Image: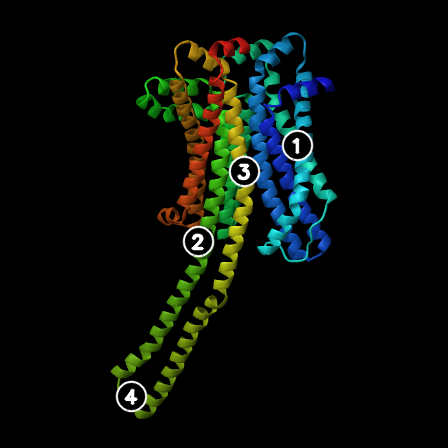
Amino acid sequence: MFSLVLASARTRLWQYAGVLVVVVMSSALVTVLATVLDRVHRADTGQAAMKSAESLLGLVGGTSGLTAWLLVVNTMSLVVQQRRREIGALRTVGATARQLRLQITGEALVISLVGAAAGAGIGLAAAGPALQWLVRNDVLDAGPTAGLSLPGFTAGVLCTTAIALLAAWTAANGPMRTSPIAALREAEAERRAMPPGRAVGALAMLGLTWAAWDWYGHRDGPHEAVNGAMALCLLLILSVWLLIPLLVRPIAALCAVPGRLLSRYSGTLAAANSTAATRRVAAMAGPVLIAAGLSAMLLCGNAVSGEVESRPVARTAAAVADRAAAVAERAEAPAASARAVPVRPAEAGAADAGQAGQAGHAGHEESRPAAAPERGDGGRAERQRDRNAVGMRILMTPLITFSAIGILNTLLLATRRRRQEFAVLRLTGSTRGQMLRMLGWESAVVVLSGLIAAAAVVAVSLGGLCARADLPAADLLELLPWGALAQVAAGCAGLGLLGVVVPGLLVMRVQPSRTARDVG
């Protein structure tokens, strides 16, 4: 069995190339974070430094680990889908579902161990510069020094291998439940877009989303409102990613309308391909949803959190100013009545003294709360903005890198497997230009499907934040980082076009008759 697994992994190395790259990067990142935590612990710089390092490890490692797991699951699902004919043939000649599941999981184990070991070595080399950068940017206190860390290396290898194995087991579990004849039939034509297990997982994730949102709703404060919106967005991204095989057909049909109108042959053919191959389009749009959704969640959350958390302070300052104005009006009232009502000289002197005392008390009431917030808030706000900027760079760098690799790998894998389809189209008279335009329209459908799903998720989350934090929609629209969001959308579009057109060009360089003969 082991020799069969090694031979199969070696022959399918091009399929696992994207998984291997994601595993290497994930292992390197986990190793860096675990090494930083270990060096901080050894330096014994205090509880504050330990809490900062633990928060960094938990936030960056959790976000990046979730992204890596989703991308590995997405790639493994596409690999297993493309092996449905092989799986059906092997089960027809007597192979059991357990044997095939162990073979696929064993291939993932071999790939993940090699990638995790290489990534852990890279992480140990990069941990020293990363630690110095964190200290230099005041993320960590001075004191920890660079050095090798056996716990960091072990954590990188074990965590990444566990992620890859769980992803492979999840991807291989669904197709093994179908009969051999059904597997052979579905290899030629898709009969159902949504596996039952994925549908159950999506319903469970939606229930968890509602429970988390309800739990945050019973907690007061702007900080809890922001955390609730971020948790809602993250869980909704997972739910929509699970449901995307059902959602992608109507979304793809809508996104294909411009292609139908502008290109009668290429656009119509691209629309037909997108609506017919639901699983393939869903697998290709999944990384776009993950990349755009998580990036927009972090960008919008960072932009809105400062405003939402400062609104109670602004309301308190306004209330203090109103109170001071009311006190000043009450202090002026006796003076006006004294001018209107005649009094004796002795009483006038006492009234003047009382008015002076009340005016002095009003001035004291007015100046005391107004001067306090201005002394230290400016420096604290600036330091917090700097920390937020550093934290955003730490979070966005691995997220963008993982997402870019996931998008390119999925699109390259899905397009390269369509060699026979391209050969048939070429043999029936389609030109290279028509084929490239078709691929361009298909990439537009894939990217738009992922971006529309991500935009819907982020809009729902921000709407919930507006309701919880009493923030008007007009103010929210002014706070959003539209330039950064446009860059995310443009990056996804560029990666989508690159991941579809480049392998299409490589496939179309081969003669159509030779391609059809080799695939057949």
Could you say where residue 388 lies in the image, as x and y percent from the top left?
52, 52
User: In whole angstroms, how far apart are the C-alphas of marks 2 and 1?
Assistant: 43 Å
Amino acid identity at mark 4: Val
Q: Are marks 1 and 4 in contact (CB under 8 Å)?
A: no
Which label's residue is closer to the chain start, 2 or 3? 2
Q: Which residue is mark 3?
A: 401
- Residue 115's tag is 1
The mark closer to the camera, 2 or 4, is 2
User: What residue sits 41% from the left and 50% below the top?
Assistant: 470
Q: CA distance from mark 1 to mark 3?
A: 16 Å
User: Would you say the residues marked 2 and 4 are in contact, meaning their CB atoms lie under 8 Å apart?
Assistant: no
- 113 relative to 291 in the view: left or right: right
Q: Residue at x 63, y 52 (%)?
A: 132
Query: What is the C-alpha distance between the residues marked 2 and 4?
Result: 54 Å
Q: Secondary structure at mark 2?
A: helix
**Nearest the camera: 164 or 317?**
164
Q: Which residue is mark 4?
A: 343
Between the residue at mark 2 and the residue at mark 3, the CA separation in whole angstroms equals 29 Å
**What percent of the width, then of the height, locates residue 43?**
71, 55
- Comparing marks 2 and 1, which lies closer to the viewer? 1
Does residue 372 lie above or below 491 as drawn? below
Q: Earlier in the sequence, mark 1 or mark 3?
A: 1
Comes first in the chain, label 2 or label 1: 1
Quadrant in the picture for the C terminus: top right
Crowd around label 1: few <14 · some 14–19 · many ≥20 (10 Å): many
Q: Which residue is mark 2?
A: 307
The residue sitting at the bottom extreme is 345
* Above or below: residue 426 compared with residue 392: above
Residue 117 spot, x, y in % from top left: 69, 34
